[in-house]
Image: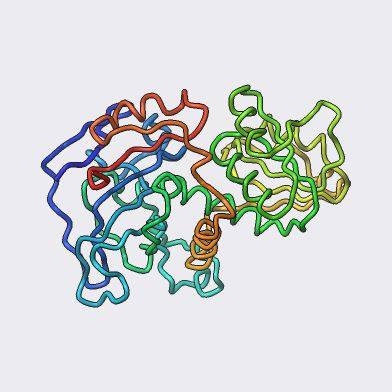
Amino acid sequence: MQAVVLTAPHHLTVVDDLPDPAPGPDDVIVALEGLGICGSDLSLYDGHRAVPGTPWVVGHEAFGRIVAKGSAVTGHEVGRRVVVEPNYACLACADCRRGLTSACPRRAVVGMNAPGLLAERFAVPAPFAHVVPQELAVEDLAAFEPYVVARTAVKRSGIPKGERALVLGAGAQGLLVSQSLLALGIEPVVVELHPERLARAVALGATAARDDDHGFGWLYETTGAAPALRSGIARLAAGATITLVGLDAAPLPLTMEQVVRGLFTIRGSLIYDHPHDFRAALDDVIADRVRPSVALTSRYAFEDAPRAFAEARRQAGKTWIAGPGLG
């Protein structure tokens, strides 16, 4: 079967000789219909993250149709469309038993320490393949997994309705955080240097931050850039809650004294917890409270996946690839 594999940094190839996956007793086999390109995928592509070996199948933000299932699988009928929750927690460790599957030390991270999903067909443990209604737009499914990340960050922050929140960045994750806030009746005020990205956030309903905008009680950092966080902290009120969504290996640009004197609460938010965060996000999309597709800007055919990766960082929003199964 066909798949898109990484052989070296900046070298992706469409191959046609990968063996078809066989389902384990608890797996479903999914025919790929679409996959979004994530910043972590681009880190692999650029060589900033190591892969277990090459050639390596990339990608994880996938949806498609069930074409086969294992002997122990119930409730996942062949032909149904599913969206993949691409972090397979063990569900048995202490963190998983506490409900913090995002912290599972044995978590299989698809596309990173487990093979990716940018292939004609792939196997998924059935509990991590969420059946979705046929009528949902495929574009919303292409950006669904990062929407769950954004929604979970907002939920974890504990922000109440009626507040104003400072959102750093209007890339895909920044837009989805802003949309999550808007769905709760919260005004997102966005800091973004890229004019086209800022315009997309404003079109969504966010407010562009002014130089004199200060006194925020809630901050969401989505860029993964320490300088952005430093500038955002200067806009905060005492007692503010800082939620970190973007990833950066650099030290935080604030001191312990700043945290103590500012009475700040700092929260990290990594992905989401299984299974309730995916299910709650799906309810939002079904009820038309949100449209994750607002994060998308570019669609590519499966055979053009190498070009999609090469051009993704130049896009104002999120890039996605239509799978062979989409028709």
- In this rendering, is residue 277 above or below 63? below
Q: Quadrant of residue 170?
A: top right
| Residue 51 image point, x, y percent | 33, 41
* On screen, residue 235 above or below 117: above
* Above or below, 274 relative to 253: below
- Report the label total: 0
Q: Residue at x 26, y 64 (%)?
A: 28
- Give me the residue at 54% from left, 52% from top: 149
Q: Which residue does the image show at 63% across and 50% down from the upper left?
A: 180
**Residue extending farthest front:** 135
Q: Residue at x 58, y 50 (%)?
A: 150
Q: Quadrant of residue 10?
A: top left
Q: Say whether residue 235 is left or right of residue 207.
A: right
Q: Nearer the viewer, residue 118 or 292?
A: 292
Whether residue 103 is visible: no
Q: Is residue 139 left or right of residue 161?
A: left
In the rendered view, how is the structure colored?
Answer: rainbow
Residue 258, image x and y in percent?
83, 42
Direction from residue 128 to residue 66 in the image, left or right? left
Residue 72 to residue 319: above or below: below
- Please state the horizontal and vertical placement of residue 77, each as a whole percent of the image: 27, 69
Of residues 111 and 23, the one nearer the viewer is 23
State the residue in front, 26 or 293.
293
Q: Nearer the viewer, residue 126 or 8?
A: 126
Viewport quadrant of the C terminus: top left
In the rendering, at what x and y percent does residue 44 appear? 38, 36
Does residue 80 appear in this view?
yes
